[in-house]
């Protein structure tokens, strides 16, 4: 059931989640931003594109994934 930020692997969710984390931590960027779960409802290309956007916008130096089979 999607919340206000969309599905977990969606571009909208990932970038909104990152922005909320940056605000909460009082910083402009993180060293690494992980996507911890594969979302079968979201195309992998969308998830990877969102992670690339985080780096391009300077909000993450590096990105990574875990628990992707």
Image (tube, helix red, strand yellow):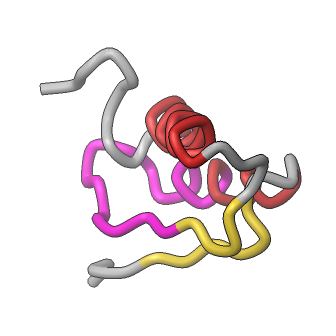
Rendered location of residue 23, percent (x, y): 60, 36
**Is 34 located above or below residue 52 in the figure?**
below
Magenta segment: does it hold 24? no
The C terminus lies in quadrant: bottom left
Report whether 6 appears left or right of 32.
left
| Looking at the image, residue 11 lies above or below residue 9 | above
Residue at image point 39% right, 23% down: 5
Indicate yes or no whether the magenta region holds residue 41: yes
**What x and y, as percent, mark residue 60?**
73, 62
Residue 52 vertical placement versus 50 (above, below):
below
Residue at the farthest left position = 1
Q: Quadrant of residue 67?
A: bottom left
Q: Residue at x 57, y 56 (%)?
A: 45
Q: Report the front residue among 3 and 26.
A: 26
Q: Position of residue 65 (x, y in %)?
A: 46, 76
Estimate the x, y position of residue 50 in percent, counting from the top left. Answer: 63, 48
Residue at the spot x=72%, y=75% of the render? 62
Specify the farthest residue to the top: 4
- The magenta stretch is 34-49
Give me the residue at 12% from left, 26% from top: 1
* 42 on left or right of 44: left
How many numbered marks are there?
0
């Amino acid at each position: 059931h999607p919340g206000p930020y969309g599905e977990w692997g969606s571009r909208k969710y990932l970038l909104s989640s990152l922005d909320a984390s940056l605000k909460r931590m009082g910083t402009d960027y993180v060293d690494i931003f992980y996507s911890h779960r594969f979302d079968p409802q979201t195309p992998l290309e969308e998830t990877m594109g969102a992670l690339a956007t985080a780096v391009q916008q300077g909000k993450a130096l590096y990105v990574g994934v875990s628990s992707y089979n």
